[in-house]
Image (cartoon, grey):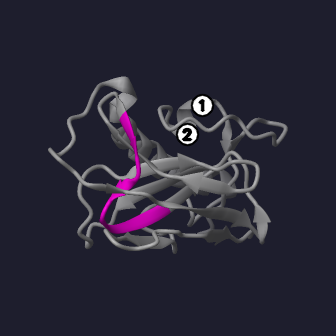
Amino acid sequence: MRTCRAEAVIRHSSTVLGLALCISGCAGEPVDAPPQVDLFPVSGVITRDGEPLASALVIYTPDIMGSAQGFGATGVTDAEGRYELEYRSGEEVKAGAPAGKYKVVISLIVDNDGNPLPADPDTPPMMSGGIESIPPPYTSPPETPFAAEVTAGGENTFDFDVKSP
């Protein structure tokens, strides 16, 4: 049985929605972070088929099998596809991410005309009123091929290229 594109987008978008809700503190309610989590700068470039991907939400979610602490971290790409991660703890936002292994999810919400909606780490992607333009598996933590390991002494620069279907 073949799943239609709309069903696939809904299935994968619901995964991103759940992840974003957890990271953002369930629609604005503060979430306590583990005490004294050390953060390390993380940056990189996101491209689609080799071209910079602007306005994309980059979500690092702790790998279940990894050692990352906390809730993960998020970033938004600029016009050149560059991002820097931020760690959110309740209402506090700090640069960086805890050391550990992560699955990396990319989301780019667009309006009906295909124009990117502003990425906002505080708003779950599917609550933005737009359409997910990144194809599966890049939008689903269990299925994404993207992974990163943030280290205390490492460069922590991770570039990812989303391939069009």
Which range of residues does the magenta coloring cover?
Answer: 93-104
Q: Does residue 93 appear left or right of residue 59 in this picture?
A: left
Alpha carbon of mark 2 to alpha carbon of mark 1: how far? 5 Å
Tag 2: residue type?
A: Pro
Q: Tell which of 154 and 23 is nearer to you.
A: 154
Tag 1: residue type?
A: Ser
Asked if the residues shown at circle 2 and circle 1 are in contact, with their CB atoms under 8 angstroms apart, the answer is yes
Q: Total label count?
A: 2
Q: Which residue is mark 2?
A: 125
Q: For the residue labelled by badge 1, is the local secondary structure a helix, a strand or a loop?
A: loop
Residue 128, disc: 1
- In which quadrant of the rendered view does residue 38 lie? bottom left
- In which quadrant of the rendered view does residue 98 lie? bottom left
Counting other residues with Cα less than 10 Å from the Cα at mark 2, is it few (<14), some (14-19), or many (20 or more)? many
Q: Position of residue 88 (x, y in %)?
A: 36, 39
Residue drawn at point x = 34 percent, y = 27 percent: 91
Q: Position of residue 25 (x, y in %)?
A: 33, 33
Q: For the residue labelled by badge 2, is the local secondary structure a helix, a strand or a loop?
A: helix
Q: Position of residue 92 (x, y in %)?
A: 34, 31
Q: Does residue 99 appear left or right of residue 74 in this picture?
A: left
Q: Position of residue 135 (x, y in %)?
A: 65, 61
Residue 47 located within the stretch drawn in magenta: no
